[in-house]
Image (tube, helix red, strand yellow):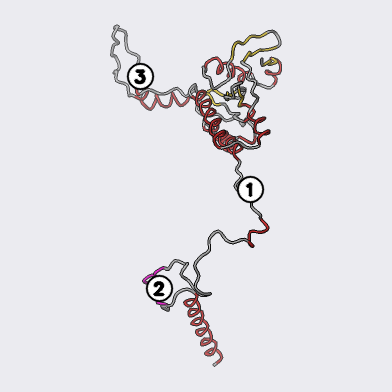
Amino acid sequence: MKKLKKSEMLRRGQVEHVKAERNLLAEVDSNCIVKLYCSFQDQEYLYLVMEYLPGGDMMTLLMRKDTLTEDEARFYVGETVLAIESIHKHNYIHRDIKPDNLLLDKFGHMKLSDFGLCKPLDCTNLQEKDFTAANNLSGALQSDGRPAIPKRTQQEQLLHWQRNRRMLAYSTVGTPDYIAPEVLLKKGYGMECDWWSLGAIMYEMLAHQWFKGIEWEKLYQMEAAFIPEVNGELDTQNFEKFEEGENHIPSSTKSGPWRKVSNNLGLLIAISTINMFCRL
């Protein structure tokens, strides 16, 4: 049972958050999120009675196991995807997706919890008729004979809808390790921020033992992973050969270091010649 003190909610300005949490739990019927059985209140507190999940949370599991196998991570990330999708379908952003809020039931299945920071978005899908220019001319009658109400033009409809919608959230909320960049930028964000948080959780589940067993101090004493074919100190076969452009001065037919040597010799001769004339 979640027990919320009314005076604290008012003091912290959390009334809308609590309403959103209660409404989401009442609206969303999904086996992927914690169920709300009932809610009631007295003069001091608001009570939310929810199902108990005895399997603990994902944070505790990760602390005990450190990392999960790819199959385990895939399973729990998959169930979290379904949970996030179920609330997004009802136009809510969770805004605090983190391992602490992923609870396990007695069978080990995951359910999303703690909707105290969730935010409803007015993302009502527009129908084609919402953008259709007015068909009824002034003075036209409806089917019952009453004067037809003039319809807005397409531009007026769009502007009206834009003024009244709330497509983005702006508050910087959440847990630092899992906050999406757009939330921190305070320029507005949508449901994508929940997916960023899930990606951070997936990284924590796997981390990855890529360098396990590597002996750093012995790397340059070990046989290399790839040994190139080299025929002599001046062999250039392992470098790509490029054709000279039309505007370039033709160079020696020899490639690789020999070409560089010949070019450098030419430069030295030119400099010596200039110095000689200067001395004269």
Of residues 278 and 108, the one nearer the viewer is 108
Residue 164 can be seen, yes or no: no
Determine the CA span between mark 3 and mark 1: 68 Å
Q: Position of residue 76 (x, y in %)?
A: 56, 30
Report the quarter where the C terminus lies.
bottom right
Give the residue number, with chain letter if any, for mark 1: 212
Q: Main secondary structure of the magenta part?
A: loop
Give the residue number, with chain letter if any, for mark 2: 248
- Name the kind of residue labelled 2 in the image: His
Residue 245 on the magenta span? yes
Label 3 environment density (alpha carbons within 10 Å; few <14, some 14–19, many ≥20): some
The residues colored magenta run 242-251
Label 1 environment density (alpha carbons within 10 Å; few <14, some 14–19, many ≥20): few
Per the rendering, the mark at residue 151 is 3
Classify residue 45 as left or right of residue 269: right
In the displayed structure, would residue 167 be above or below residue 140?
A: below
Determine the CA span between mark 3 and mark 2: 70 Å
Q: Are marks 3 and 2 in contact (CB under 8 Å)?
A: no
Of residues 86 and 190, the one nearer the viewer is 86
Of residues 245 and 203, the one nearer the viewer is 203
- Name the kind of residue labelled 1 in the image: Lys
Q: Are marks 1 and 2 in contact (CB under 8 Å)?
A: no
In the displayed structure, would residue 165 be above or below residue 231?
A: above
Local secondary structure at mark 2: loop
Per the rendering, the mark at residue 198 is none
Local secondary structure at mark 3: loop
Determine the CA span between mark 1 and mark 2: 51 Å
Q: Earlier in the sequence, mark 3 or mark 1?
A: 3
Q: Position of residue 245 (x, y in %)?
A: 38, 70
Q: Residue at x 42, y 68 (%)?
A: 241
